[in-house]
């Protein structure tokens, strides 16, 4: 038996958004099922780390699920390419949402300064709420 995640367990991000401490990473190497996502939500998880390759599955689960998008926290660890706005928009379309709550820049980013600058542009455009490293 796995206890339900406490909904209050969150950190406040700089922009004021709550970051749930418990979440589920959905790696590209292992495609999640709708049943897995429903079970995670049923256990109280609201934070899901997504990748572009699983965005469609997650988007369908959100659209057909019992929890509103506004109650979920979607994050991605992403070294965005130079065409990142188009790439990110395609991911958002697959997720059925207008924004990601958090995008983290990995230490392995090829050009940290340029990528961070690009992330800031995406944040100003409203496609990303919060940024981190």
Image (cartoon, helix red, strand yellow):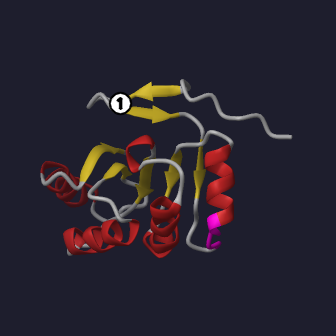
**Dot 1 crowding, Cα within 10 Å, few <14, some 14–19, many 20+:** some
Magenta range: 30-34
| Image quadrant assignment for residue 118 | bottom left
Pick the front one: 43 or 20: 43
**Residue 33 belongs to the span the image colors magenta:** yes
Q: Could you tell me which secondary element the residue under label 1 belongs to?
A: loop
Rendered residue at 43%/51% (across/down): 74
* Residue corresponding to mark 1: 13
Majority secondary structure in the magenta region: loop
Say whether residue 88 is visible. Answer: yes
Position of residue 24 measured from the top left corner of the image (x, y, whole percent): 60, 51
Rendered residue at 45%/69% (across/down): 55
Q: Quadrant of the N terminus?
A: top right
In the orientation shown, which residue stands out farthest toward the right? 1
Position of residue 78 measured from the top left corner of the image (x, y, whole percent): 39, 61
**Residue 129 belongs to the span the image colors magenta:** no
Pick the front one: 4 or 19: 4
Rendered residue at 62%/73% (across/down): 31
Compared across the picture, whether 42 is left or right of 130 comes to: right
Compared with 91, 113 (above or below) is above
Position of residue 12 measured from the top left corner of the image (x, y, whole percent): 39, 26
Pick the front one: 96 or 77: 96
């Amino acid at each position: 038996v796995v206890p339900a995640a406490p909904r209050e367990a969150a950190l406040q991000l700089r922009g004021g958004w709550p970051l749930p401490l418990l979440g589920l990473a959905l790696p590209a190497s292992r495609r999640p099922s709708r049943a897995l996502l429903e079970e995670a939500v049923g256990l109280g998880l609201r934070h899901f780390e997504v990748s572009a390759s699983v965005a469609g599955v997650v988007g369908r689960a959100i659209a057909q699920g019992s929890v509103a998008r506004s109650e979920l926290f979607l994050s991605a660890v992403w070294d965005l390419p130079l065409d990142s706005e188009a790439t990110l928009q395609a991911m958002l379309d697959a997720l059925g949402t207008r924004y990601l709550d958090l995008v983290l820049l990995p230490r392995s980013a090829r050009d940290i300064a340029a990528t961070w600058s690009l992330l800031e542009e995406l944040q100003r455009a409203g496609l990303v709420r919060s940024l981190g490293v």
